[in-house]
Amino acid sequence: MAEKGELVPIVTDLAPPLAGSPFRYVGLDRDNTLIEDAGYSKLDQEPSWLPSVIDGLRLFHSFDLGLVIFTNQAALSKGVFNLFQLEDFHMRMNLSLINQTGFGFNGIIICPHLQDQGCSCRKPRPGMFHTAQKIYGELPQVMIGDSDTDIQAAESAGVFAVKTHQEDFLKVSSEWLDR
């Protein structure tokens, strides 16, 4: 339980793992890793998947790995959009994945704080990973992201991290699974 005044991440459980079963999952950054950066004003649009992302997610799913998104969303604290708008976008993103593959994300962990608010969850700090460990019983098997802050946050939490670029998600996913 969070202490009064403690800044904590927001967690959306989309498809929680079965109780008592070990849950192995992949940590994923959202913007410019899975989808084109929606920008502050584009949450009302449909998510635009980056090349090879759907195939990479199918590959992870074929290895019985769950999918959890870790995303900084300071625009919530700035008042650019509200939590309802963000969750609506995430639900549409999840439904798009389900419609294309038959499976969806297991969860989304959001840091809504500004960089200067001093929270422990905003990447590059590892707080979202600590929250995930409390929820899922373990850390992700790997974190895939496009920025140095994604990699730093994962490594600070003791998670193996892989940096991807917009066009190589499937390649990066395959190489990690083959290691």
Image: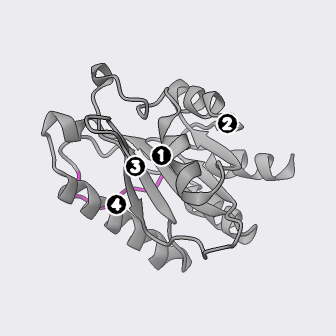
Q: In this view, does 52 lie to the left or right of 72?
A: right
Query: Decide: marks 4, 2 in contact (CB < 8 A)?
Result: no
Query: Decide: marks 2, 1 in contact (CB < 8 A)?
Result: no
What mark, if any, has residue 90 been given in the picture?
Answer: 4
Quadrant for residue 93, please give it.
bottom left
Query: How far apart are the two marked residues, 3 and 2, measured between alpha carbons?
Result: 28 Å
**Circle 3 is placed at which residue position?**
1
Who is closer to the viewer here, 163 or 124? 124
Residue type, numbered disc 4: His
**Circle 2 is placed at which residue position?**
161
Determine whether the residue tagged by mark 2 lies in a helix, strand or loop: strand
Residue type, numbered disc 3: Met
Who is closer to the viewer here, 46 or 61? 61
Rate crowding at label 4 as few (under 14), some (14 to 19) or many (20 or more) other CA atoms within 10 Å. Answer: many
**Circle 1 is placed at which residue position?**
70
Q: Is residue 110 left or right of residue 125?
A: left
Q: Where is residue 107 shown, x and y percent of the image?
A: 47, 61
Location of residue 30 with respect to 57 vertically, above or below: above
Determine whether the residue tagged by mark 3 lies in a helix, strand or loop: loop
On whether residue 47 falls in the magenta region, the answer is yes
Question: What stretch of residues is rendered in magenta?
Answer: 43-50
Sequence-first tag of 4 and 3:
3
Q: Where is residue 35 shown, x and y percent of the image?
A: 43, 50
Determine whether the residue tagged by mark 4 lies in a helix, strand or loop: helix
Q: Residue at x 16, y 46 (%)?
A: 81
Location of residue 31 with respect to 138 vertically, above or below: above
Give the number of the mark in front: 1 or 4: 1
Secondary structure, magenta segment, majority class: loop
